[in-house]
Image (spheres, grey):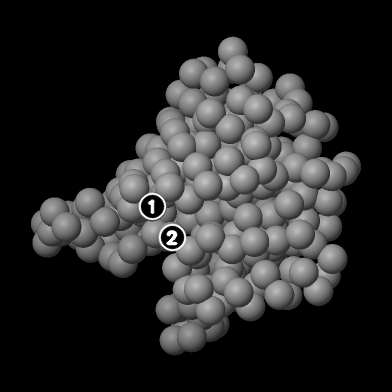
């Protein structure tokens, strides 16, 4: 599986799964365009990847800012003359709030982070994806899209359900251009996404493995390998799919 010369944008990629995806596709020869909010960290990640022999650049912008998303993705597309893959990894819980106490600002913040960001980035990338080779968009949804999330995470689940649906809608809309659109749905992956419970109740965090068929928590590389496959021509006949990456967690045991 070679990705030589592919231009790949990965949002939210200075840590965790996004960074691991950058390493996976970069090692296969892709040019990796990182995104994040911390410019110093972004520069450090570019240095790290470059030392691994990976071609990488960093673009610092907020994925919820329509103007900045459009400006930066257009800049990448114009520089390289194409975009081969857009990986909409950026997102997050955004905090917890029960609906009775939920503010409109909180609602809009979570929806913007997880759903608006996918729309803004995808829309901006489409003209350049049309010029790409086996072009693709890969979105990140979650088990919460199906089970609505835990207490206080209902809006996170709602936004991720939106990602599941926009993935299928984009796939329908872009099929005529040969642009594939898929999503991945990671289960419990051992990253800083769970930093709160990992630092305060590590025994509870580790106990979650008991609810996973394969008996362990996921690692970022478990997700990155699947994403790299979806970027490649080996996945040329896969579109409008959401792939569960959770060791059987979605079925429960």
Residue 154: give x, y in percent of width and height.
Answer: 30, 52
Vertical placement of residue 42 versus 77, above or below: below
Looking at the picture, tell me which residue is in the foreground, 241 or 52. 52
Q: Residue at x 73, y 52 (%)?
A: 31
The circle on residue 103 is none
The part of the image, by quadrant, that contains residue 136 is top right
Q: Residues within 10 Å of mark 2 (few under 14, many from 20)?
A: some
Are dots 1 and 2 in contact, CB under 8 Å?
yes
Residue drawn at the location 46% of the way across and 24% of the way down? 169
Q: How many marks?
A: 2
Residue placed under numbered mark 1 in the picture? 68
| Pick the front one: 99 or 162 | 162
**Which circle's residue, 1 or 2, is located before the other in the chain?**
2
Residue 137 x, y percent position in the rendering: 59, 36
Q: Secondary structure at mark 1?
A: helix
Label 1 crowd bin: few (<14), some (14–19), many (20+), radius 10 Å: some
The x, y position of residue 209, in whole percent, is: 62, 66
- The residue labelled by disc 2 is 61
Q: Quadrant of the N terminus?
A: top right
- Residue at left offset 65%, top offset 36%: 82
- Image coords of residue 126 (percent x, y): 52, 30
- In this view, 244 is above or below 233: below
């Amino acid at each position: 599986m070679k990705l030589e010369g592919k231009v790949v944008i990965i949002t939210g990629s200075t840590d965790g799964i996004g960074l691991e995806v950058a390493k996976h596709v970069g090692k296969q020869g892709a040019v990796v365009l990182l995104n994040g909010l911390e410019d110093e960290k972004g520069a450090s990640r570019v240095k790290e990847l470059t030392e691994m022999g990976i071609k990488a650049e960093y673009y610092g912008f907020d994925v919820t800012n329509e103007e900045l998303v459009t400006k930066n993705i257009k800049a990448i597309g114009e520089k390289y003359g194409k975009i081969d893959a857009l990986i909409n990894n950026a997102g997050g819980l955004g905090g917890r709030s029960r609906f009775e106490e939920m503010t409109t600002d909180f609602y809009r913040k979570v929806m913007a982070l997880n759903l608006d960001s996918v729309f803004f980035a995808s829309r901006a990338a489409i003209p350049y994806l049309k010029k790409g080779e086996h072009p693709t968009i890969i979105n990140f949804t979650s088990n919460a899209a199906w089970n609505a999330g835990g207490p206080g995470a209902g809006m996170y689940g709602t936004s991720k359900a939106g990602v599941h649906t926009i993935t299928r809608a984009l796939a329908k809309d872009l099929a005529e251009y040969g642009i594939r659109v898929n999503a991945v749905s990671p289960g419990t992956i051992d990253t800083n996404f769970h930093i709160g419970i990992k630092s305060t109740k590590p025994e509870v965090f580790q106990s979650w493995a008991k609810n996973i068929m394969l008996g362990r928590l996921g690692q970022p590389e478990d997700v990155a390998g699947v994403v790299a496959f979806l970027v490649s021509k080996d996945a040329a006949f896969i579109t409008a799919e959401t792939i569960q990456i959770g060791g059987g967690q979605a079925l429960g045991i």
